[in-house]
Amino acid sequence: MPISSSQVTITTSPTLLVAGDAVAEGVYLHAKHEIFIGASDVTSSTGYEMDNGDKLTIHNHESPIYGIMATGTGTMSVLVITK
């Protein structure tokens, strides 16, 4: 199983965290600041809120995942495991 990891800097504009991938088995996200995640049109009002230190696992994702900050910049740790 191929594994890739990254530290993504998030700003107040939607930032791609993970590209859509039909063969990705799992995506593991760890927020290092208050970050909102969703589709390419994510906002701090519509996104799924992840507080500092929150972790989230998404299985079998096919759509891209974006993150955005309400203010300032932050970091999201991303781990992707592919079949």
Image (spheres, grey):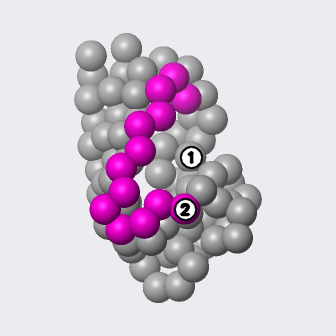
Q: Is residue 25 visible?
A: yes
Tell whether 19 sits left or right of 8. Answer: right
**Label at residue 49:** 2
Quadrant for the C terminus, please: top left
Residue at image location 47% in from the left, 60% down from the top: 50
Residue 60 is inside the magenta segment: yes
Indicate yes or no whether the magenta region holds residue 10: no
> Local crowd at mark 2 within 10 Å, few (<14), some, or many (≥20)?
some
Report which residue position mark 1 lands on.
Answer: 65
Near-viewer residue (12 or 31):
31
Residue 45, numbered label? none
- Using a 10 Å C-alpha cutoff, classify the residue at mark 1 as few (fewer than 14 neighbours), some (14 to 19) or many (20 or more): some
Name the amino acid, label 1: Ile
Q: In this image, 77 relative to 42: left or right? A: left
Residue type, label 2: Glu
Q: Position of residue 61 (x, y in %)?
A: 55, 29
Q: Give left or right: position of 67 versus 45.
A: left
Q: Which residues are magenta?
A: 49-61
Residue 65 appears left or right of 52: right
